Image (spheres, rainbow, N blue to C red):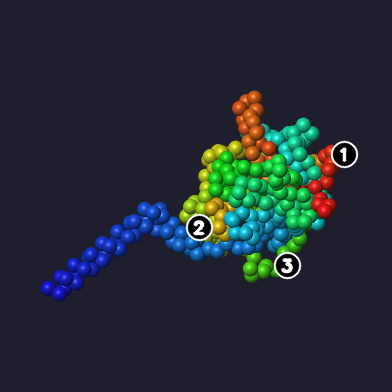
Amino acid sequence: MKKNIKKFFSCILILILKSLIFILEKIVGDQRRLRSYLVISSEKAYDDNTIVLNIDGTLRKIFKVTPHGNGDGGFDVSTPYHKEKSGYLFLIRIPYEPGMTYVNLEENTTKKFVTTTDVSLSIHRSGFVQFSKSSKIISGVDKKTGKTKGIGLTGLSLLDNPIKSGPTFGVQVWGIEDFSELPKKKEKVNYIEFKDLDFIYEGCTKDDRYSYCFEVFLFPIDKLRYAYKKSGELLITKSFDNYLPSPGKVLTLKVVLINNCPSFLAILGKKMPLHEEMPKSGYMLNGPSRIIGKTEDGYNIGEMMKAYYPDPKFFKENDSIDYRG
């Protein structure tokens, strides 16, 4: 009798455990994903996320992502590691048409400044995005007019409603010998390392002159359940239906977490062609854009923020954005 009771309760316990596993599998997807989700849920966000490029064993610091001190989930993107500090900040109209698009700078630049300092791309939870540098350049919003003082865009809810059609921002670099080396990694810094094989070619080959491009996407935090750990890196693999060179292509991106942010960052590495007129070394910090109209063919026209170092001197006369107060 006792054996039958023991057997009965054992069967009940097994059924309960199987039911729990079944429920968890339905919630998370499968046992493998469950294990990954449990690992990822223990991941922490860092105050300093530095993206480094590893070329033939030499590490160079490219840009970093730091959360805002007020804990609103916003963050700054900066490139303080290049030796050139003279730059050009501007807003430009760009048509979102298939393929490589080249626009006339003089006709499509809507606002422009020069500066003598490196700047940060600051993305706020409020929907305000701007180039800024504390006590160094003019920034913020004019309280009377509601217009941006420097180079910025308002009404972009990027963190709560991430852009689905492409990356939110990007960093393009070339002539990497002018970026600071990383002699030794620090314990409290999250280093996101890119090696040569982490980049895909787009519009160029290994024999062409190319730049290293870091396209940064924002995904809602609930999509983090699809991420996984591999060789110590937090990654996510995703199919991009709107990837113009090859629609539906499956790509792997490197994940960065930000405290209190309703989204997480995912970075894609690309190698892209460089114009002959580009200087030997430099970088571009490409911000988000807002839709301001449509082309005759029905494609969206965006107004995009850009920072270009060194100052390419596109125009003979430019106002300085440097703070003089």
Provide the residue designation for mark 2: 228
Q: CA distance from mark 1 to mark 2?
A: 50 Å
Q: Amino acid at mark 3?
A: Pro
Residue at figure coordinates x 78%, y 51% from the top left: 137
Which residue in the rendered view is the most extreme toward the front? Answer: 144
Q: Nearer the viewer, residue 36 or 122?
A: 122
Does dot 1 land on a helix, a strand or a loop? loop
Q: Earlier in the sequence, mark 1 or mark 2?
A: 2
Front tag of 1 and 3: 1
Quadrant of the snapshot with the N terminus: bottom left
Q: Which residue is mark 3?
A: 183
Q: Where residue 256 sits: x, y (%)? A: 59, 57
Would residue 213 be visible to someone looking at this image?
no
Q: Are marks 3 and 2 in contact (CB under 8 Å)?
A: no
Question: Percent x, y for residue 208?
Answer: 73, 44
- Residue at 64% of width from left, 70% of height from top? 187
Horizontal relation, residue 247 to residue 274: left or right: left
Residue kind at label 2, given as amino acid type: Tyr
Q: Which residue is mark 1?
A: 316
